[in-house]
Image: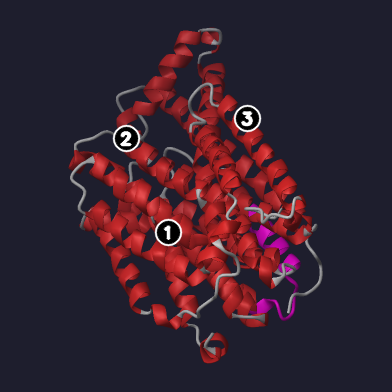
Amino acid sequence: MNKTIKEHSWIPLILVACASFIITLDSTFMNVSISQVVADLNTNVSTIQLIMSFYTLITAAFMLLSAKLQDIVGKKRLFLIGAVLYGIGTTIAAISTSDTMLFIGWAVIEGLAGALMTPATVSIISGTYSGERRTFALAIESVMVALSAAVGPIFGGIMTTFLSWRYGFACELIIVVFILAMQNKIPNFEPTESKDDLDIAGTIISFIGLVLFVLGVLMLSDYNTTIVIILGLIVLAIFVLFEIRRKRNGKVPLLDMDLFKDKNLRVGSAIILLSYIVMGGGLFAVSVFLQTVLKLNAFDTGLTTLPLTVGLLIFAMAAPSLTSKLNHKTIMAIGSIISIIGCLFLLNEFYLETTMLELMPGMFILGAGLGFIMSLSTDISLTNIPEESQNNASGITTTGQTLGESMGTAIIGIILVLGVIGGIIDAIDTYAPEHIDDVQLYDDIYEDFQKVGNVDDLKAYNSTVVHAADLIVQNAMGFVMVVTTAMMGIILALTFRLDERKIQ
């Protein structure tokens, strides 16, 4: 390894951070571009949403295998293989002429490439930097992931409104070319295991378990998916037992379960999972409100969520410098409290007449708190892990991150639907109590509410209908904010379980 690169250059950090940025961006910027993609490819919304879900599914399913392949192939080589595949996938996606072509390029090839690169981004940083430099580098990498998730809507809005969604994939290709052109700046890391050490049976079991679990989560809005999630959890439990037994027999496991004995890794990974659920789900719910109720275009939707990005960036950049005065635990606890304040600020801000400006302060506060949490959660998770186990541990943290991103939209989507149903019940109870037992009326209102959303569409109705619709919106988005606040409260409680010592 080049010692000069290791001690003095930030170029390796820049390269892996760029990779983290585009991998996460891929799962967010298309959310505001769906209608244009549907028109361009002559397909339907359900198909595009399915493609988006499969991107997440494939990335999550291969994450643990990718973490182990770092030991067998070498983390730099695996990272570069992933970058080449990503370039191929994003090119195919950019020039897609059909939904099948988009599925192959985006969901399959880019999803696999993202799985190969993601654990390597964390382990390359951990192997390249140490001490305060590692804290700063891991914070930047985490910021890039969170930032791309938050900036995705406005990036997609700009591409969709002024150019085309295809240019979004083209921009990713430019970043891939930059990474490959600068690959010599990334230190070399020799493999520590051979291909004979690969746990094929464990790989298959973990793949099946993760696919079932993530698929069940992504299909939460449908019926009979609980059984899929339960089956996934059962298979994952079998995977855990299989890995424990494999290690006892003196063989190399796909995932060393002994790592979970480290409290910071357990708790830190849970915090990562929950924080990404909060951010991904929160952005989804707010975007739905802005586009379906306020009828904002893709660009204005992204502009409204921009304060969350700004708050996240400012506070995440400040967090590493604060570690010289406060420990990680304290900073993350403060971040949790700030985010809770942001959620409470937004709790009563969603009406038919809400403006963009009324939402921006709460979005900024929520993002600021998440900036403190996300920038330090990976570093504190890995702080007690020995160097030889860093690759395995990075697979755990990045799997939590990926699952959080995929679960956020699905979970908050269900919460949003439940909020709408609760709002309909309150609206009927308030404005038409004589129909409180009319089940058909509930169904009719629910169907109509999905078609009608903003004030202009409701002008044809009387004031009672407008007030009822306003109450439904308040209940739905208010319920989302209550659940989000509760999740941030859980994160706050978890920070108190982290190792209290200041990490140098």
Front residue of 323 and 432: 323
Q: Can the viewer see residue 311 in this picture? A: no
Q: Is residue 64 left or right of residue 386?
A: left
Residue that mark 1 sits on: 23
> Is 70 above or below relative to 433?
below
Q: Secondary structure at mark 1?
A: helix
Say which quarter of the image contains residue 231.
top right
| Left or right of 156 in this view: 137 | right
Neighbours of disc 1 within 10 Å: few (<14), some (14-19), many (20+): many
User: Regarding mark 3 in the picture, which secondary structure is present there?
Assistant: helix
Q: Please identify the quadrant where the N terminus is shown.
A: bottom right
Q: Which badge, 2 or 3, comes first in the chain's sequence? A: 2
Q: Which percent across, then down, holds residue 424?
A: 51, 22
C-alpha span from label 3 to label 1: 29 Å
Which residues are drawn in magenta? 321-340
Q: Secondary structure at mark 2?
A: helix
Of the residues shown, which amino acid type is indicated by label 1? Answer: Ile
Please tell me how crowded label 3 is: few (under 14), some (14-19), or many (20+) other residues with Cα within 10 Å: some
Q: Which mark is residue 47?
A: 2
Of pointers 3 and 1, the one earlier in the residue sequence: 1
